[in-house]
Amino acid sequence: MSGNGRAARVIEAKGLTKVYGKGEGRVEALAGVSLDVAPGEWVSVVGPSGSGKSTLMNLLGLLDRPTSGRYVLDGREVSGLRGGDLARARRELIGFVFQSYNLLPRQSARRNVELPLVYAGVRGSERKKRALEALEQVELSDRAAHKPPELSGGQKQRVAIARALVGRPAMLLADEPTGNLDTKSGVGILDLFGDLNAAGVTLIVVTHDPEVADRGDRIVDIRDGLVFADERSGGVRE
Amino acid sequence: MRAFRIAGMGLSGLLVNWGRTILTMLGIVIGVAAVVLLASLGNGIQKSISGQINDLGPNLITVSPGTSGEQDGGDNGPFGAAAASTLTPDDTQLVDGLPGVAAASSNVSTVAPVGQESVSFSGVDPSYDEIRAVELAAGRFVEGRGEVVLSQADARRLLNSGPDEAVGETLSVGTPPEDAPERDPEQEGPAQGPNRLPERLPERLREQIPEGFPQDAAPEQEPRQEPTREPTQEPAPEPVRKYEVVGVAEASDVEFGPPIPESSYMATGDALEVSGVKTVGQIVVQAEGAGDVDRAVDGISKELREAHDGAKDFSVITQRELLSTFTEITDQLKIFLAGIAGISLLVGGIGVMNIMLVSVAERTREIGVRKALGATNADVLFQFLLEAILLSLIGGVVGVALGIAGSAVLPEILTDLPPAVVTGNEVALAFGVSALIGVVFGVLPAYRSARLQPVEALRRE
C-alpha cells in the first residue's frame, strides 16, 4: 500500500495561510492549516461554503501560493516555488480531477489523456501507450477515440481521472468529482476511486456531500479557515 | 524535444479545431485581400490617368530657333520653324544625351513634289513617333531613310487608297527633270520665304557677339549661311528618289498642348536633302518624367548655348500650364490612394485584431486547464505564438493570392475599370501589417491569460 519509493508523507503542510486583498477588504481565507497525509490514504476535505476548503485545495494543488506557511509535497519543499518550477511540480506530483471535467472538447479522449505527457516532454508513441493504459484503468478503452461531447458525464469524469493518473503523480486531487453527475454515475466514480485507492493511489477529495466524504479513510472538516475536525471515518460508515 | 511535442500538439489542435482556425484565418485573408485589391485598382487608375495626361505631352520640350521666349510652337511649328534656323541635327544628338532627356528628334518641314502634287513632309527621327505619340492607321513609323509615312489625306490624294493598301507602295519624290522649271518656284515658295529670314537674323545676332570673337572658327555658324547659297549652287536640288510607304498616320486628336499638324513623315536626312537645307526647324524633346522637365530644360539651355559659342539663338519651350495641372492631379490622386490603402489597412487590421482577441478570450479556460496539467507560462505563450504566426502567414498568403486574383478579374468584369497594377510594396505592406497585427493580438491576450493563476483561468467560462 505504501508509496513505492515515495516519501513517508505525501503531504506535510504546516500553518498554511492565505490572505486576499489589503486593508479594509482584507479577507483571511485560511488562518493556519496544518495537515499530514500518508501515502495510500484517502482524505476527504469537507466544510460549508466560504469555509476555505476550496482555497486549501488550490494551495495543496499548487494552483495558488500560500501567503505564509510551509508545504512539503512528496518530500519536496514546494511553498516557495514560482513560475516554471511550480508548473513542473504540478505536472510531476499532482493529478487534478475537476467538477466540470475541463476536457478539451474537440480532442479525442486519448488526446485529452495525453496532454500532461506532452508538457512532460514524452514522445508520441510512448504517450499513446500510456494514455491507453490509463484509459484501461478507468475502464474506458473502448471510448479512446471519442470526443468529450460524445461521452456521458460519468465517462467524461473517467477520462479526466485517466488524465490525472497518466503522469503517475504522488496524489490525485479531486474537487467535487461527483458534483455534476447523477447518483448512479457518481457512485461509479467513487467505486473507481476505491479501486484506485486499493491499488495504492493517494486521494484528496474536496466535497460538501457527506456521502462522498464518508467513502474516505479520513475526513478533514474546515471551518472559518481552520481545521475544525480531523477524524477517521471508519466508525461513521454504514 | 519538449518544444517540438508542444508545437506538434498546437498544430494538431489547429487542424482539430478547423472551424475556429478557418474563421480566424478568414479575418486575415479578407484584410490582406482588401488592401491588395484596393491598392492595385488604385494603382491601375493612377497609371491610366497618368497615361492619358502623358499623351497630352506634359513632358514635351520644344527647342525652336530664335530668342523668343513666347510659347508659339503652334504657329511656328512646321513652317515657321525654318525661319531662324540655327539648329542642326548635331544639336539634336547633343540634346538626346543630356540628363533628364528620354528622347529627342529633329523636325524639318519641307514641301516636296510627288508626281503632280505638292506634299508637306516632316523630316523626323525614329524616336519622334514616341515623343509625339503618332498614331498609325497602318504599318509602322519611319525608321530610316528611303521610307515615308503618309497622312491619311495624302494617301488618299496621292495613291487614291486607304491606309492598308497604301503600305508597301512606292512614291517618287522630287521634280522630274522636264517639270523642273515649272515646279521649282511653286514648291520653293514656302520653303524659300522662311529661308530668307536667317540672313537677317544671324546678322542681328552677330552684332551681339563680342568683337574679336572668332566667328569663322565656329562650325555651327555655317549652316546659317547654307540656305542662301544653296539655290545657286544646286540648280536641280531635288533629284527624283524612290520612297517606300511604310505606314499611314492616323489623324491627330490631341486636345491640349501643341497641335500635331496633319502631316506626312520622312527621315530627317531625307528631308534635309529634299529641302536642300542643313538646319532643322525644331527639336522636340521628351523629358524622362514630368519631374525631370526643369532639369532637362536647364541642361538643354546650357549645353546648346555652349555648342553655339555662347549665343542664345534658340528658345526652349515647355508645357508649363499642362505640367502644373498634371502634377496637381497626380498629387491629389496619390493622397487619395494612400487614404484608401490606409483605411483598408486599418479596417483589415481591426478585423484581424478582433477575431484574434475573441478567439484567445474564449480559450482562457483552456489555458487554465493546460496550466493545471503542468504547462508553464512559456509553454502556453509558445503555443499561441506558433498558432498566431501560422494563421497569419497562411491567411496572408491566401489573402495576397485572392487580392491578386481579384485585381486580375475585377477589371474584366467591370470593363470601365482600367487594368489593376499590383506592386510588391503594397503587397508587402498589406501582408506585413496584417501578419504583425495577427501575431501581436494573437499573443497579447494569451500572455495575459497565461499570467493568471490557473484557478482564475479555470473559473472563467
Image: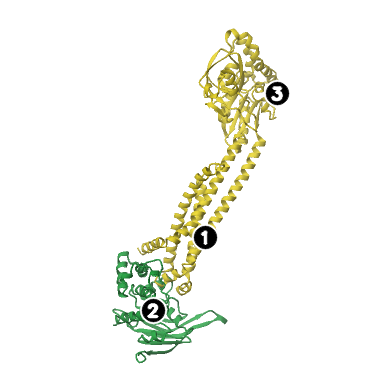
Chain colours: A green, B yellow
Tell me where residue A204 appears, x and y as whole percent: 38, 81
Question: Mark 3 against mark 2, which lies toward the viewer?
Answer: 2
Residue behind mark 3? B208
Q: Is residue A27 above or below residue B30?
A: below
Q: Amino acid at mark 3?
A: Gln
Q: Is residue A185 left or right of residue B39?
A: left
Residue behind mark 1? B353
The Cα–Cα distance between marks 1 and 3, rounded to whole angstroms, is 75 Å
Categorize mark 2 by other alpha carbons within 10 Å: few (<14), some (14-19), many (20+).
many
Q: Chain of mark 2?
A: A
Are the residues flagged by discs 1 and 2 from a single subunit? no
The Cα–Cα distance between marks 3 and 2, rounded to whole angstroms, is 110 Å
Question: Counting residues from the N terminus, which is met first, the one under dot 1 or under dot 3?
Answer: 3
Q: Chain of mark 3?
A: B
SS under mark 3 = helix
As drawn, the label of residue A173 is: 2
> Pointer 1 and pointer 2: residues touching (CB < 8 Å)?
no
Tell me where residue B279 appears, x and y as whole percent: 61, 20
Q: Is residue A227 above or below residue B144?
A: below
Question: Mark 1 against mark 3, which lies toward the viewer?
Answer: 1
SS under mark 1 = helix
The Cα–Cα distance between marks 1 and 2, rounded to whole angstroms, is 38 Å
Categorize mark 3 by other alpha carbons within 10 Å: few (<14), some (14-19), many (20+).
few
> Pointer 3 and pointer 2: residues touching (CB < 8 Å)?
no
- Residue B276 visible here: no
Q: Amino acid at mark 2?
A: Leu
Q: Quadrant of the N terminus of chain B?
A: bottom left
As drawn, the label of residue B460 is: none
Task: Please identify the quarter of the rendering in which residue A2 is found.
Answer: bottom left
Q: Nearer the viewer, residue A78 or A228?
A: A228
Are the residues flagged by discs 1 and 3 from a single subunit? yes
